[in-house]
Amino acid sequence: MRFDICLNTVDTVERETGKRPEFILAATPVQVGVGQILFLAENGYTVVRP
């Protein structure tokens, strides 16, 4: 299992609140979260949704 963090979302939260959100260091930052989801799905990963 891996966790990716969308940096676009992090930047938006920082811009709107004035504080950069904290996240676990084990997570992998990616610039565009949706793009990463599409890339992984196209390369055989399973996307799990609630």
Image (cartoon, helix red, strand yellow):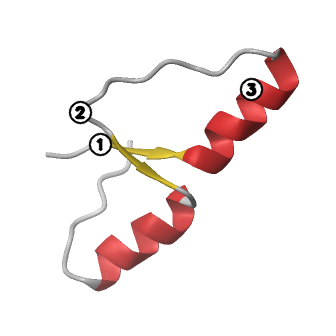
Residue at the disc numbered 1: 3
- The numbered dot on residue 25 is none
Above or below 20: residue 11: below
In this view, the residue in front, 37 or 23, is: 23
Q: Position of residue 10 (x, y in %)?
A: 63, 35
Can you identify the residue that label 2 sits on? 26
* Labels 2 and 1: the sequence-earlier one: 1
Q: Is residue 9 above or below residue 30?
A: above
Q: Residue at x 32, y 84 (%)?
A: 42
Helix, strand or loop under label 2: loop
Q: Closer to the camera, 48 or 8?
A: 8
Name the residue rendered at 38%, 41% in the picture. Answer: 50
Label 1: element kind:
loop
Q: Pointers 2 and 1 in contact (CB under 8 A)? A: yes
State the separation of the CA atoms marked 2 and 3. Answer: 20 Å
Q: Residue furthest bottom?
A: 42
x, y percent for residue 18 = 81, 16
Label 2 CA crowd tier, 10 Å (few <14, some 14–19, many 20+): few
Residue type marked 1: Phe
Query: Which residue is pictured at 21% across the width and 46% down the height?
Result: 2
- Give left or right: position of 49 versus 26: right
Sequence order check, earlier mark of 2 and 3: 3
Residue closer to the observer: 48 or 32? 32
Q: What type is the residue that disc 3 sits on?
A: Glu
- Helix, strand or loop under label 3: helix
Residue visible at 42% across and 65% down?
37
N-terminal of the pair, mark 3 or mark 1, is: 1
Coordinates of residue 11 in the picture (x, y in percent) = 71, 38
- Which residue position holds label 3? 14
Residue 44 picture quarter: bottom left
